[in-house]
Image (spheres, grey):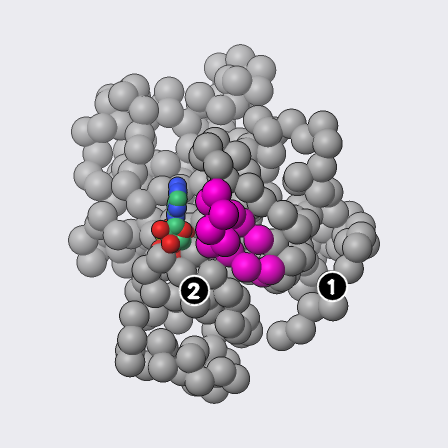
Amino acid sequence: MTIAPTKKIPSISVAVSANRSKLQCPILQARNVSVFYGSFEAIKQVSLDVNANDVVAFIGPSGCGKSTFLRAINRINDMIVGCRVTGQIHLGGHDIYGRNVDLVKLRRQVGMVFQKPNPFPRSIYDNITYGPKLQGITRRSELDAIVEDCLRKAALWDEVKDRLHSSAQGLSGGQQQRMCIARTLATRPQIMLMDEPCSALDPIATGKIEDLIVELKQYVTVVIVTHNMHQAARVSDRTAFFYLGQLIEYDKTSTIFTNPAHKRTEEYVTGRFG
Ligand SMILES: Nc1ncnc2c1ncn2[C@@H]1O[C@H](COP(=O)(O)OP(=O)(O)O)[C@@H](O)[C@H]1O
Ligand SMILES: [Mg+2]
């Protein structure tokens, strides 16, 4: 894939609203993005587009920069002392590194799910309503509706509907992770970032999350980091292969796994290194 370097990325606001009719259009555009830790360049001049309502997998050997690039998309890297991002990332046509960007709003639009489920030590209900309450939603009926809607979308409603006011930490690991996905959905993100979301889960819980990711496409765009190539093949529409901080190849997942353009990609997906 080739992306011509651009100074200004054209607005895609029209395309984003067309997202409802499932047109393929980029919701996220990264151009020449580099991420430095001090003088070390962990991500090198990466450009890629993510289409709305796609699932995109980031694969590559440990330390190649997958998490670093993911964290550039919601500016969590800003919290790391000595970390610097150059290049452009546009979300829905807006430069997320532009002046006056509201980071709280950005992180609502770009939700994140981590390796280990991280429920707050509160009830399931309180976890899900935490974000909406911060946004000023106080009506009980409205909060109830959000809780049910998000838990249904996260394929967890039937398992927890009778224990919404019990501690979220009493759920199994897989249920906790689905609850974290529901909690993220409650702030109505445009994109959900997932950094190895199944790495702490058993195979059955992993299968449920994978099924869920495919379902989530109806509502949100998903970018998932995974070291599990079967997982990437099962859930994603497009796959980006990173190696030593470079984006080596980004294409349809079927192409990456069956007919990659680069030798390094082929060696990685066939398990010859990693
Ligand atoms: N907070 C940090 N400070 C300094 N170097 C880091 C930090 N986080 C990651 N790195 C380095 O950046 C590179 C990419 O790391 P990472 O993005 O975690 O890779 P991956 O997620 O693909 O395993 C590695 O060399 C790693 O050691
Ligand atoms: Mg990582």
Q: What is the residue that sits farthest to the front in this orientation?
A: 39
Q: Amino acid at mark 1?
A: Pro
* In-image side of 269 versus 200 (left or right): right
Q: Give the extent of the magenta segment.
A: 34-46
Q: Nearer the viewer, residue 137 or 44?
A: 44
Q: Amino acid at mark 2?
A: Leu
Residue 204 in which image quadrant:
bottom left
Q: Earlier in the sequence, mark 2 or mark 1?
A: 1
**Is label 1 in a helix, a strand or a loop?**
loop
Which label belongs to residue 244? 2
Q: Is residue 16 left or right of residue 204?
A: right
Identify the residue at horizontal 46%, vertical 44% (top origin): 37
Q: Is residue 231 visible from the viewing direction of this image?
A: no
Q: Quadrant of the N terminus?
A: bottom right
- Let me know if residue 101 appears in the view: yes
Which numbered dot is residue 69?
Answer: none
Which residue is rendered at x = 48% and y = 15% of the image? 140
Q: Position of residue 108 (x, y in %)?
A: 55, 32
Q: Magenta: predominant secondary structure element? A: strand
Q: Percent from the top left, x then y, of residue 229?
A: 34, 69
Q: Residue at x 22, y 41 (%)?
A: 173
| Residue 42 covered by magenta stretch | yes
Magenta span contains residue 272: no
Q: Is residue 35 left or right of residue 176?
A: right
Q: Residue 162: x and y, percent? A: 27, 28
Q: Which residue is mark 1?
A: 5
- Position of the C terminus, as image quadrant, is bottom left
Identify the residue at image location x=58%, y=15%.
136
